[in-house]
Structure formats: C-alpha cells, structure tokens
Image (cartoon, grey):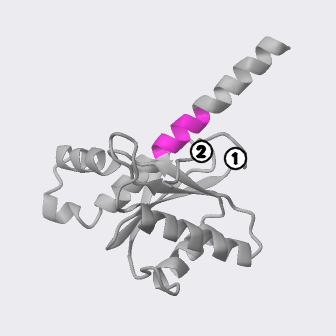
Amino acid sequence: MQPTPDKPGRDDPGQGRRLALDVGTVRIGVAVSDRGCILATPVETISRETMFDDDKADIDRILRLINEYDVVEVVIGLPRTLKGKGSSSVKHATDIASRVSRRLAGEEKLIPVRMADERLTTVTATQALRASGVKAKAGRTIIDQAAAVEILQSWLDERNNYLQACDSANEVGD
C-alpha cells in the first residue's frame, strides 16, 4: 500500500521552525522556515549515505539540524506521479522519515515527521534556477535545496490557509 501525503494544519504543533527534506538516492536537500512559518529558505545539501541499513552520517546531520534550528515539525517530500501514485523513490523518502522519527523518539523529542506531496517540486526548482541564470551543471549542487524549499513553502502556504480558514470559521461562530 502506498503512503498518502499528510495535510498541513491537522495536529499542528503551533509556531516555530519547520525543516523540510527532499530525499534523493544521492543527495538530501534541506530547507528551513522562519519561526513565523511564512518563508522557506535553503540550508544545505547532505550527501546520502544511509541506504536501507544502519543509520549513517546523513541521519546524524539531519538530527543536528533539527536541534540547531529548534524545529517543531519535519516535512519530508513524498515522491508521487502526476496521477498521485507513489514513484519508485517512495521507499527512500519513507525510510528516511521512519529513521528520523525513530531517532527523535529515542531522544524523547515529540516532533512530528510529516510526508508532503512533492509532485513537480524538482521541475519547478530547476526552472527557477534556470530563470535566475544558474547553469545545469552548477545547479546540481543546489537543486535539492531548491526542491526542499518548494516542498516547505507549499506546506507553509497550505498550513497558513488552513489556519486562516479555521480563524474565519471561529469568527462566524462567535
């Protein structure tokens, strides 16, 4: 059974930074939000080392970033086709998600790890980089960060829309 993406807003941990990961077979792009949950910015690209075996330095680095940025929620891109089916990369993303969740639980940190629909984020990120004049070869080093920014910015926008809708509904009920 294919995992389905989470929706922002449900069980929201409140204000605070979010960290997003774009998991690939070679690299993991990382982005983080501001504390107000408005804007996603790139952080770094981590070399992918863990491949369905013991945790390696990539997982350790992700945990250090979560602590360094005082993250309240982790958002990991869930690769899907345009028809909404899971792509072959789903196993990589869900493996990293479960490892990060397990490690956070081991540190007794109640930080939710969510899976977000990442359809077309790499395409959008690539187009944005080209439009800004970044060459394809140079872009490979930052494309994963840009994709993580796209994943996180979509999450933040959807979260803020959800919270505004809740506020509007509460105003009507008052």
Q: Is residue 92 above or below residue 158?
A: below
Q: Are marks 1 and 2 in contact (CB under 8 Å)?
A: yes
Say which amino acid is labelled 1. Answer: Gln
Residue 15 tag number: 1
Residue 16 seen in the current view: yes
- For residue 171, what is the image quadrant? top right
Residue 60's x, y, as percent?
Answer: 54, 81
Q: CA distance from mark 1 to mark 2?
A: 7 Å
Name the residue: 48% across, 54% down: 2
Q: Position of residue 31 (x, y in %)?
A: 46, 58
Residue extent of the magenta highlight: 153-160
- Which residue is drawn at the image coordinates 40% and 67% (left, top)? 44
Viewer-nearest residue: 92 or 123: 92
Comparing 46 with 135, the one in front is 46
**Residue that label 2 marks:** 37
Sequence-first disc among 1 and 2: 1
Q: Is residue 30 left or right of residue 9?
A: left
Percent position of residue 80, x then y: 38, 49
**Residue 158 colored magenta?**
yes
Helix, strand or loop for disc 1: loop
**Rendered residue at 55%/66% (across/down):** 97
Magenta stretch, main secondary structure class? helix
Name the residue type under label 2: Cys
